[in-house]
Image (tube, rainbow, N blue to C red):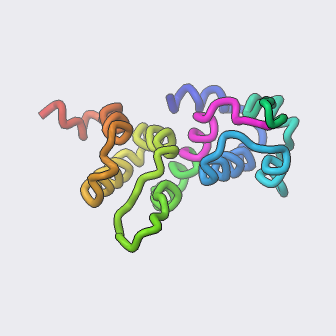
Amino acid sequence: RTSTYAYIFKDINNRKELTEFSIKCEISCKNEFTEQELNNLISGTKITTDWLLENKIIKKNSDKKGEFYATFHHTITEFFTAQSIIESKDIALFKKWSILKTPTKTPQKYFNQSWYGVAQFLLESDLFDQTLDFFLEIGEENNEVVDQNFAENLSRINFPDKNDPRKD
């Protein structure tokens, strides 16, 4: 996936602003926005609603409630968010953004399932070890998060040869 998205977006303008927009979308855990919400997300950047529409980052939709904007495909924002984390060479931000804040006093970590797509991109990168360690840490600390989605994401890992436990 990473190489496909890297190729598709290799020449896109306003990459920095698109990355910031993508991170805001991922943090908000939203793929659909009112016009006002979208304007707030792009406020102070070089990108406009028209630019996002022209570059197929978002599309305009409507339903019974009225018109709204939606990301064209969620993996676009996941890709740009992951690329930002990869460029930082540290998954600290991923850890911060992907953990749900629990209302209890327990120290357990609850992984926000909407971040699995970002995790998949990280698991295809040089941050493989850090990302896998993070997932294993979450699973060990809180086995309640080890559900079908958690297991499926770990089972999709394309282990680099040096780390592939299937080769032992």
Q: Residue furthest left?
A: 168
Looking at the rendering, in which quadrant would you find the C terminus? top left
Whether the magenta-drawn stretch holds residue 81 is answered as yes
Q: Residue furthest bottom?
A: 105
* Residue at the image point whose x is 33% and y is 37% from the top: 148
Q: Quadrant of residue 13?
A: top right
Q: Position of residue 37 (x, y in %)?
A: 79, 50
**Is 77 left or right of 110, judged from the image as shown?**
right
Residue 25: % across, % down: 66, 48
Q: How many numbered callouts? A: 0
Residue in view at x 37 percent, y 45 percent: 128
- Establish if 91 lies above or below 64: below
Is 81 situated above or below 65?
Answer: below
Measured from the top left, where is residue 124 in percent x and y?
42, 37
What span is in magenta?
A: 68-82
Q: Main secondary structure of the magenta part?
A: helix
Which residue is pictured at 38% across the width and 38% down the height?
149
Residue 70 is a magenta residue: yes
Residue found farthest to the front? 64
Percent coordinates x, y for residue 158 in the rendering? 34, 32
Would you identify the image quadrant in which residue 43 lies?
bottom right
Q: Is residue 46 left or right of 70 when viewed as pictured?
A: right
In the rendered view, would you say 23 is above or below 61? Answer: below
The residue depicted at 79 percent of the width and 47 percent of the height is 38
Between 6 and 108, the one nearer to me in the picture: 108
Q: Is residue 45 visible?
A: no
Quarter-of-image position of residue 165: top left
Residue 49 in sight here = yes
